[in-house]
C-alpha cells in the first residue's frame, strides 16, 4: 500500500523540513530542492498485480528510496537522478488501453511529470507509444513483451529498456539444444491473446531451426484467466509430447501447475515455462522439479554474481522477505537507465537540469549496467534494449528447497535479432548474425 | 472412442463447480428477480475464506478430512456475513425498480468487493494443497484424474439435489415457490416476503462461496478470479433458463462439454464458443432451455 | 417550422457555440477528457434511446467496437484519415449492424435483451482477439486524423478533435431531442408503458424497437469512431462487457430526461475515475462502485433531473416528459 495522499503529503513535508533543517543537498549538482517527477504505471489490481505489477512497484519504490538516499552502489551512488530527488506517482494499469491513454495524458498534461515509466501489457505499450511522441513526453516502457512496438513503428520519445519476448523463446530453444535434450514432438499451452500467440510462434519457429524434425502435436490456447485446465491437461497427457511449452504467467501458470502436477504431466513430458520464474516465490517448494524455465532475463535465481546485483537481491529480500523476480528487476533496470541517461545529459550540458530532448538524445543507443547485466539500446533505432539472459532447470537443494540449477547464460547478441531485423524473419532465416560464444 | 470419454469426463468435471455457482445465481434470480454480478465476488471471497480457514485444521492437529469441513464452514461464514449485508443493507432499497438498474447496483458491489478483498488478503496468491491429496488419483483410459476433482461432481449433485428437495419437499420450500410465482399474493396470504428474500439470497451466496471454497485447492487464489466466473455462470443460467434448477444443471453440462469438445476439435473457437452457444440458445429459445413461457400482461 | 422545434435547434446551436468557446480555455488534459467523455456520451445517448422504449442493452460495446474498428481499418488499410469521413463510416457500419441484429433480438425484453446483447458483444470480442491479422488482443494504432485535408500540428490536434466532438455531440443531441419529441419517438414511451395496447392501436412494437436499436447502434458507432481517433489506438476490449457496463452506468447516471445530461455524466465518470486513480491507485474501483451506488440512491432521476430542477423547464430539457417522471416508479 502506498499510503493515503495525506500521508504522502506529510511525508513530503517532513522530507522538506529535514532538508531545510540540515541543509542536506548534493552541492555542485542540480539544486536539491529540485525534483524529478515520474509517473509509474503498473498493475495494482487484477490478474497481473500479484505476478508483475505489485512486485515491480515494490522494487521501484525501494530503489527510488535508496536512490534518493544515495545508498545505491557505484556507479549509481549519486542522490536521486543527478541530484534531483525522485518523486513517483503510482497509477494502476488495470482497465485496458483506453484508460491508459487517458491516464498517460493526465500524467503528462495535468500532473506535469518529467517522465513516465511503466506498462506491463503489450496492448498498453502499443497504445501509449504514439501518444508519447504526440505529447513529446519521455516514456520508458519497462516490461511489455511484444516486438511489434519498434518493429512496426518508430517513436522518438518512447524507449523500452528491456528485451522483447522473442529473446525468451529463442533462448529456451537454444537451452534445449545446449543441454542435448532429445525432441521428436512438441506441444504448447499458451494464453489466448497476443502474448501467448507470439510466444508460441517464436518458440515453434526457433525449434523449427534447431530441431527441424520435431513435430508440433498439440497447440492449445485456453482463454486468458481461464483458471481451469482439466481438459487441456488431458489433451497434453494424451499426446505424450517430448516437450510441453507454456508462456503462461501469474495465476494462469500457477493454476496450470497445481492442476497438472498430480496428474503426472511433469513425468510424461519435459515442461518448459518461458517466463515462469515469478511463480517460484508463490509456490515455493510445491514448484515441480526438472522444469526448464526462463525469467525474461538474467533475473532472480538466475541473476549474475555482480556487486550491483548482490546488493539489489539482498536489499529487496531484506525489505520484502521474498526473492526479487523478473518484475522488480525490469523496473530497476528502467530506473537505472533513466538515471544514467539523465546524468549523461547533465554531464554534456554542464550540470544543468536537462530538458526532455536532452535526456531523449542521451537515452538513444545508451548502455548501462543493471542488476541483470549490461543493457544496450541497440534495436529500434536506439530505442529498444537487448540484454543477456539465462535459462535454468528447477531442482531441490540439499535442504529440500526449490532452486534453479544447470543455468546456461546467453549473450544478448545470441538471442536477440540484430538491428533492423524483424524478429520472426530473423528466426526463420536461421538467426543470421547471432553471436553466441 | 477415448476422445468421447475424455471430453465427457473433462466436461463434467468443469461443469460441476460451474453448476454450483450457477445454482446460486439462478436461485437468487428466481426468487428476487436479481441478476447478481457480485455473485462472482462471492465465489472469490469463498475461495479466500477457504484458504484462510482450511489450514487451521492441520495446524490444530486434526486429520486432513477436517480441512474439508473447514472449507464448508468458510463458505457458511461468507454467506452469514455478506448475504444480510448486501440484501438487507443495499438491494432492499431498490426492489421494484428496473431489473437493469439492480444489475448495475450489483456491478458496483462487484467493484467494491474486488478492492475490499484486496485490502483484506493483499495481492499475493494463496494455495490450498492438502484437500486435493485426500482422494488419490484415478485412472480413466490412459489418463490420470485427481480423485478430488471427481468428488466435486458428487458435491455438485448433492447441492443440486438438496436445493431441489428443499424447494419441493419442505414447507419453507413451498412458500418460496409461492413467492416465486407471485410475491404480492403470497404477502397477502401472510408470508413474510422479506424473510424469504433473505433466505434465498443467503442460500445463493452460500452456494457461490461453496463453489469458491471447493475450487480453491485447484487454483491460485488471487485478485481477478471473480471476473471470468461471472460471465461464465451468466452464460450457464441464460442457456438453461433463468430461475430454473434443472436448467442450471443442463446449462453447466452443456458449457462444460462444449468447451471440452472445442479444446479437442476446434481450439480456435474455445474463447467464444460459450457465448456463441448462449446467443444461439437465446435466438431459438429466448427464455432458455428450461423456462416456461409466461403470460403477457395486458 | 414548429416553435418548439426551432427552440431545440437554437439551443443546440447556442450550446455548441458556448462549448467551442470553452474549448479554447480548457487545459490540454481536460480537453482530451471531454473529447473522450463525448465519445462515451454518444454511446450512452443510444442506450437512452433504447431505454425510452423500456429496453437496456448491456452490450453496446458491440456497436462501439464495430464503429471503432470500421474507422480504424479504413484509416490503416485504405489510408483514409479524414475525420468526418471516418465518423460517418463508423456510424454507418454500426447502424447497419444494428439493422441486421435488431430484428433478431427485438422480441426480447428486460434481462434477456440485456444478456443477449452481452452475448453478441462477447462473441465479437472473442473473434477480434483471434484475428491476429488486425492485431489480435493488442489491437492496432491509428494514424492522426485530418480535417478536410488539413493536418493539424501536435498542439492543435487535440483542439481540432474537441471541436469535431462538440459539433457531433450537439448535432446528435439535437437530432435525438427532435426524434424523441416526434410522433415516432413518442411511440417508444407508449411501448414501454404497454406493448399490447400499442399493438391493438395498430402500431408495430417490433418496428419501434428495431428503429430505436438501429439508432442506438449508429450512435454507438459514432462514439466508437470518435474515441478511436481521440485515443489513437483500438483493441478488442472495446467490446468487453465491462466497457458496456460503463455505458449503462453513464445512461443511468444521466437519466432519460435530458439529452445533454449523458455528456455531463460521462464527464463526471471520467473525472471521478481519473482522480481516484491519481489519489487512490489501489482502491479506485471501490470508489467508483461507491460513487455509482450513491448516485443511484441520491439521484434516482439522474443528472437530467437536476437540470430540470435547476432550469425549471429549460430550453432543451424535459418538454412533454413530466409525465414520464412519475411513470418511472412502475416496473
Image (cartoon, coloured by chain):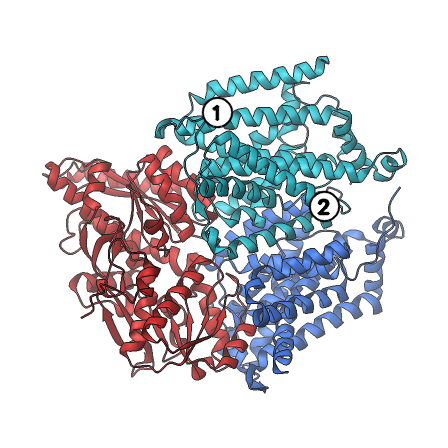
Chain colours: A red, B blue, C cyan
The residue nearer to you, when weighing A177 against B285, is: A177
Rendered location of residue A155, percent (x, y): 31, 43
Horizontal arrangement in the rendering, residue A105 relative to residue A335 (left or right)? right
Report if residue C253 is visible in the image.
no
Q: Is residue A16 above or below residue B22?
A: above
Badge 2 local density, few (<14 within 10 Å), some, or many (20+)?
Answer: some
Looking at the image, is A230 positioned above or below residue B248? below
Residue B242 percent coordinates (x, y):
74, 57
Of residues A157 and A404, which is closer to you in this image? A157
> Does residue B226 appear anywhere in the picture?
yes
In the figure, residue A102 lies in which quadrant? top left
Of marks 2 and 1, the one in the foreground: 1
Image disc number at residue C163 = 1
Residue at image mark 2: B99
Q: Nearer the viewer, residue A321 or C128?
A: C128
Q: Residue at x 28, y 80 (%)?
A: A179
Chain letter of disc 1 in the image: C
Relative vertical location of residue B176 with respect to residue A243 in this rendering, above or below: above
- On the rendered structure, is C301 left or right of B175? left
Quadrant of image for the C terminus of chain C: top right
Estimate the x, y position of residue C53 in percent, counting from the top left.
Answer: 75, 36
Pointer 2 indicates a residue of which chain? B
**Disc 2 element:** helix
Instruction: Tell me if mark 1 has few (under 14), some (14-19) or many (20+) residues whose alpha carbon lies within 10 angstroms of its own.
Output: many
Residue A193 versus residue B168: which sits nearer the camera? A193
Callout 1: helix, strand or loop?
helix
Pick the quarter of the image with the N terminus of chain C.
Answer: top right
Q: Is residue A157 left or right of residue B207?
A: left
How far across and how far down the image is residue B82, in percent? 62, 56
Amino acid at each position: 500500500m502506498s499510503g493515503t495522499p495525506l500521508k504522502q503529503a506529510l511525508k513530503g513535508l517532513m522530507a522538506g523540513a529535514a532538508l531545510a533543517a540540515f541543509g542536506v543537498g548534493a552541492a555542485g549538482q542540480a539544486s536539491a530542492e529540485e525534483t524529478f517527477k515520474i509517473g509509474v504505471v503498473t498493475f495494482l489490481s487484477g490478474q497481473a498485480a500479484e505476478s508483475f505489477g505489485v512486485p515491480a512497484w515494490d522494487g521501484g519504490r525501494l530503489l527510488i528510496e535508496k536512490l534518493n538516499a544515495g545508498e545505491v552502489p557505484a556507479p549509481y551512488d549519486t542522490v536521486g537522478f543527478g541530484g534531483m530527488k525522485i518523486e513517483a506517482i503510482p497509477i494502476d494499469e488495470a482497465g485496458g488501453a483506453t484508460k491508459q491513454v487517458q491516464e498517460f495524458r493526465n500524467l503528462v498534461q495535468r500532473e506535469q511529470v518529467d517522465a513516465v515509466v511503466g506498462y506491463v501489457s503489450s496492448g498498453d505499450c502499443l497504445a501509449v507509444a504514439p501518444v508519447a511522441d504526440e505529447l513529446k513526453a519521455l516514456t520508458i516502457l519497462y516490461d511489455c513483451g511484444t516486438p511489434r512496438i519498434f518493429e512496426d513503428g518508430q517513436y522518438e520519445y518512447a524507449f523500452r529498456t528491456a528485451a522483447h519476448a522473442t529473446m525468451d523463446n529463442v533462448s529456451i530453444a537454444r537451452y534445449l539444444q545446449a543441454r542435448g535434450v532429445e525432441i521428436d514432438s512438441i506441444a504448447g499451452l499458451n494464453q489466448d491473446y497476443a502474448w501467448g500467440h507470439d510466444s508460441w510462434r517464436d518458440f515453434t519457429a526457433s525449434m523449427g531451426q534447431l530441431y527441424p524434425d520435431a513435430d508440433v502435436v498439440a497447440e492449445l490456447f485456453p482463454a486468458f484467466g481461464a483458471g481451469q485446465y482439466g481438459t487441456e491437461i488431458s489433451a497434453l497427457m494424451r499426446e505424450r509430447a517430448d516437450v510441453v511449452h507454456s508462456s503462461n504467467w501469474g495465476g494462469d501458470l500457477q493454476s496450470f501447475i497445481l492442476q497438472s502436477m498430480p496428474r503426472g504431466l511433469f513425468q510424461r513430458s519435459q515442461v518448459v515455462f518461458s517466463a515462469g520464474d515469478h511463480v517460484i516465490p508463490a509456490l515455493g517448494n510445491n514448484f515441480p522439479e526438472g522444469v526448464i524455465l526462463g525469467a525474461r532475463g538474467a533475473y532472480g535465481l538466475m541473476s549474475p554474481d555482480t556487486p550491483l546485483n548482490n546488493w539489489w537481491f539482498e536489499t529487496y529480500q531484506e525489505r520484502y522477505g521474498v526473492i526479487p523476480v523478473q518484475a522488480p528487476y525490469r523496473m530497476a533496470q528502467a530506473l537505472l537507465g533513466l538515471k544514467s541517461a539523465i546524468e549523461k545529459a547533465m554531464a554534456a550540458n554542464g550540470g544543468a537540469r536537462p530538458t526532455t530532448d536532452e535526456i531523449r538524445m542521451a537515452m538513444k543507443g545508451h548502455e548501462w549496467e543493471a542488476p541483470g547485466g549490461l543493457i544496450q539500446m541497440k534495436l529500434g533505432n536506439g530505442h529498444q534494449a537487448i540484454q543477456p539472459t539465462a535459462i535454468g532447470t528447477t531442482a531441490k537443494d540439499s535442504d529440500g528447497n526449490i532452486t534453479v540449477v544447470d543455468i546456461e547464460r546467453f549473450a544478448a547478441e545470441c538471442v536477440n535479432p540484430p538491428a533492423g531485423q524483424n524478429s520472426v524473419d530473423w528466426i526463420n532465416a536461421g538467426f543470421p548474425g547471432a553471436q553466441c560464444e | 472412442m477415448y476422445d468421447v470419454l475424455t471430453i465427457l469426463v473433462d466436461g463434467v468435471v468443469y461443469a460441476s463447480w460451474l453448476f454450483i455457482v450457477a445454482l446460486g445465481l439462478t436461485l437468487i434470480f428466481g426468487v428476487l428477480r436479481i441478476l447478481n454480478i457480485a455473485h462472482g465476488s462471492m465465489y472469490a471471497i469463498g475461495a479466500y475464506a477457504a484458504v484462510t480457514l482450511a489450514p487451521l485444521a492441520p495446524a490444530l492437529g486434526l486429520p486432513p478430512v477436517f480441512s474439508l469441513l473447514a472449507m464448508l464452514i468458510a463458505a457458511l461464514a461468507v454467506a452469514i456475513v455478506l448475504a444480510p449485508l448486501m440484501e438487507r443493507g443495499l438491494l432492499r432499497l431498490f426492489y421494484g425498480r428496473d431489473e437493469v438498474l439492480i444489475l448495475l447496483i450489483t456491478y458496483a458491489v462487484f467493484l467494491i468487493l474486488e478492492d475490499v478483498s484486496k485490502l483484506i488478503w493483499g495481492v499475493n496468491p494463496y494455495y490450498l494443497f492438502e484437500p486435493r491429496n485426500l482422494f488419490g488419483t484415478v485412472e480413466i483410459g490412459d489418463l490420470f484424474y485427481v480423485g478430488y476433482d471427481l468428488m466435486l461432481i458428487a458435491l455438485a449433485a448433492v447441492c443440486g439435489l438438496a436445493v431441489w428437495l428443499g424447494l419441493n419437499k419442505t414447507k419453507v420450500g413451498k412458500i418460496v415457490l409461492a413467492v416465486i410465482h407471485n410475491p404480492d399474493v403470497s404477502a397477502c396470504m401472510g408470508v413474510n416476503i422479506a424473510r424469504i428474500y433473505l433466505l434465498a439470497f443467503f442460500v445463493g451466496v452460500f452456494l457461490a462461496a461453496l463453489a469458491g471454497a471447493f475450487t480453491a485447492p485447484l487454483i491460485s487464489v488471487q485478485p481477478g478470479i471473480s471476473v471470468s466466473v461471472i460471465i461464465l455462470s451468466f452464460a450457464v443460467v441464460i442457456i438453461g433458463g433463468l430461475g430454473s434448477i434443472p436448467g442450471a444443471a443442463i446449462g453447466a453440462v452443456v458449457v462444460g462439454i462444449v468447451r471440452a469438445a472445442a479444446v479437442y476439435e476446434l481450439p480456435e473457437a474455445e474463447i467464444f464458443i460459450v457465448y456463441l452457444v448462449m446467443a444461439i440458445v437465446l435466438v431459438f429459445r429466448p427464455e432458455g432451455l428450461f423456462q416456461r413461457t409466461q403470460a403477457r400482461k395486458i | 417550422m414548429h416553435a418548439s422545434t426551432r427552440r431545440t435547434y437554437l439551443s443546440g446551436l447556442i450550446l455548441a457555440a458556448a462549448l467551442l468557446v470553452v474549448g479554447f480555455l480548457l487545459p490540454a488534459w481536460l480537453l482530451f477528457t471531454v473529447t473522450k467523455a463525448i465519445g462515451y456520451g454518444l454511446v450512452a445517448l443510444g442506450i437512452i434511446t433504447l431505454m425510452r422504449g423500456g429496453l437496456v442493452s448491456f452490450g453496446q460495446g458491440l456497436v462501439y467496437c464495430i464503429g471503432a474498428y470500421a474507422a480504424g481499418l479504413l484509416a490503416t488499410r485504405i489510408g483514409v484519415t479524414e475525420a468526418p469521413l471516418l465518423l460517418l463510416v463508423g456510424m454507418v457500419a454500426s447502424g447497419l449492424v444494428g439493422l441486421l441484429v435488431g430484428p433478431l433480438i427485438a422480441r426480447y425484453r428486460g434481462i434477456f435483451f440485456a444478456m443477449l446483447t452481452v452475448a453478441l458483444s462477447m462473441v465479437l470480442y472473442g473473434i477480434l482477439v483471434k484475428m491476429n491479422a488486425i492485431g489480435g488482443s493488442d489491437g492496432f494504432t491509428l494514424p492522426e486524423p485530418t480535417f478536410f485535408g488539413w493536418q493539424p500540428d501536435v498542439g492543435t490536434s487535440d483542439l481540432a478533435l474537441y471541436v469535431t466532438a462538440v459539433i457531433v455531440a450537439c448535432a446528435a443531441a439535437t437530432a435525438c431531442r427532435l426524434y424523441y419529441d416526434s410522433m415516432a419517438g413518442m411511440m417508444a414511451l407508449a411501448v414501454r408503458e404497454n406493448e399490447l395496447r400499442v399493438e391493438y392501436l395498430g402500431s408495430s412494437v417490433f418496428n419501434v424497437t428495431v428503429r430505436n436499436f438501429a439508432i442506438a447502434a449508429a450512435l454507438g458507432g459514432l462514439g466508437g469512431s470518435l474515441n478511436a481517433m481521440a485515443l489513437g489506438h483500438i483493441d478488442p476490449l472495446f467490446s468487453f462487457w465491462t466497457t458496456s457496463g460503463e455505458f449503462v452506468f453513464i445512461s443511468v447516471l444521466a437519466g432519460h430526461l435530458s439529452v445533454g445530461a449523458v455528456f455531463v455524466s460521462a464527464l463526471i465518470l471520467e473525472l471521478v475515475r481519473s482522480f481516484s486513480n491519481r489519489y487512490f491507485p489501489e482502491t479506485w474501483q471501490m470508489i467508483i462502485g461507491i460513487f455509482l451506488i450513491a448516485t443511484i440512491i441520491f439521484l434516482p432521476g439522474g443528472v437530467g433531473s437536476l437540470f430540470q430542477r435547476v432550469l425549471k423547464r429549460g430550453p432543451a430539457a424535459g418538454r412533454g416528459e413530466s409525465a414520464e417522471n412519475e411513470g418511472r416508479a412502475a416496473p
